[in-house]
Amino acid sequence: MADITAALVKELREKSGAGMMDCKKALTETGGDIEAGMDWLRTKGLSKAAKKADRVAAEGLVAIALRTDGAGMTGVAVEVNAETDFVARNEKFQAAARAVAKTALDVEGGVDKLAAAPTENGETVTEMLTTLIATIGENMTARRMARFVVGEGVVAAYVHNAVAPDLGRIGVLVALQSSADPAKLTEMGRKIGMHIAATSPLSLSVDDIDPAAVERERAIFSEQAQASGKPPQVIEKMVEGRIRKFYEEVVLLKQAFVMNPDQTIEQFVAEQAKALGAPIVLTGFVRLALGEGVEKTKDDFAGEVAALTGQ
């Protein structure tokens, strides 16, 4: 049997983040083989993770990653959940959230594919989080992601309530297609991102708003207008006026810009295009708010992409 030295235990502990006694046992079971010991700990982590899988993880971080690709950019926002806000301040968890976001830059198809994607160190996202669950002792999951690719232009980002660079409780991405100066576009996109963080729009344009949401509002407005006892033609105009007001409240391009309420976001984009000397098209945005939509139940972990585009 191999001699399990303190140096071996220390090396495995540094690589795995697991406890000293767990590392010593792993090396004992695997004859002092570091890599086999890592696998043994991962297997043990899987067992621990299974016991924690029914615990609600509504805290954590939204992580942002951006990459310049020639004349364009790729940007991602990923919500990585844990059970407590305390863990969100843990440097290992923060590093893991950044690693997940960086991995997501090359992943198409949402969190299911992200879970199986390899990180820089060769483990999949699921394996990395499982190891971290064993180390930290809380349930964790990559719940949602959104990804934008711009062929020419920028993907700008804004993080609200940031706890560290590119990590916070609300993450916003803004995709701008344009040949204008990237630095100016990024500044513009960040301002729009701040607006989105504050107003939480439902859609980019009137065309892509959920028809069911419009019909629900129309039904409410119709009932309210009919109660006024006015003639049908007046009621119709009242309802259409309220629908226009609804669009102004929930459609990004129709919203009054929080930094200048005298102009809409659509007008702000047009103004910037004129100032920068090139057409600018706001092609999409996403706003991920930590824990949004998480119910305090056992089976609430299925997340989905929350990207809204004008395509």
Image (cartoon, rainbow, N blue to C red):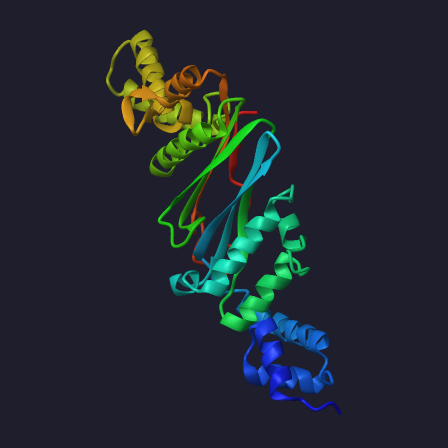
The image position of residue 87, as x and y in percent, is 43, 64
The image position of residue 284, as x and y in percent, is 51, 30
The image position of residue 145, as x and y in percent, is 54, 45
Q: Does 160 sit above or below residue 95?
A: above
Image quarter where the C terminus lies is: top right
Q: Does 86 sit above or below residue 240?
A: below
Q: Does 168 sit above or below residue 24?
A: above
Q: Does 98 sit above or below residue 247?
A: below
Image quarter where the N terminus lies is: bottom right
| Residue depicted at x 58% and y 49% | 102
| Residue depicted at x 51% and y 59% | 95
Q: Is residue 205 left or right of residue 130?
A: left
| Residue depicted at x 64% and y 89% | 5
Nearer the observer, 206 or 99: 99
Q: In which quarter of the image is residue 164?
A: bottom left
The image position of residue 43, as x and y in percent, is 67, 73
The answer to whether any part of residue 148 appears in the image is no
Most distant residue in the right direction = 1
The answer to whether any part of residue 275 appears in the image is yes
Nearer the observer, 139 or 123: 123
Nearer the observer, 134 or 158: 158
